[in-house]
Amino acid sequence: MKTNLSSFDGWFRTLLFIVSICYAIMAGGTSWLWIIPTGILFVTAVLGWCPIYEMLGLNTEKEKEKSHS
């Protein structure tokens, strides 16, 4: 599968997921609903591919430079 997320984008999505879990634990109640959208962001971070980026033609991953022989 082709990736379209940079490492910064992936780490940022993971951080949002962790913060939302901490918030849900501390606040309780309906704050658990935050975990669903940030969970989706976490899954896309793990995969390195975002379907919304794909539809919009976005790509935050830098092209790897090929070494010159």
Image (cartoon, rainbow, N blue to C red):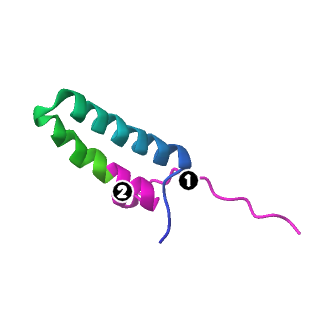
Amino acid type shown at disc 2? Val
Name which of mark 1 and mark 2 comes first in the sequence: 2
Q: Residue at x 21, y 40 (%)?
A: 34
Q: Which residues are magenta?
A: 41-69
Q: Residue furthest right?
A: 69
Inspect the magenta stretch and tell me whether residue 62 lies in it.
yes
Judge depth for marks 1 and 2 and give the one in front: 2
Amino acid type shown at disc 1? Glu
Count residues near mark 2 (Cα–Cα under 10 Å), then give few for <14, some for 14-19, many for 20+.
some
The residue that disc 1 covers is 61
Q: Position of residue 17 (x, y in %)?
A: 34, 42
- Of residues 42 and 69, which is closer to you in this image? 42
Q: Is residue 29 toward the left or the right of residue 66 in the image?
A: left
Q: Residue furthest bottom?
A: 1
Residue 27, image quadrant? top left
Inspect the magenta stretch and tell me whether residue 61 lies in it.
yes
Q: Residue at x 47, y 48 (%)?
A: 10
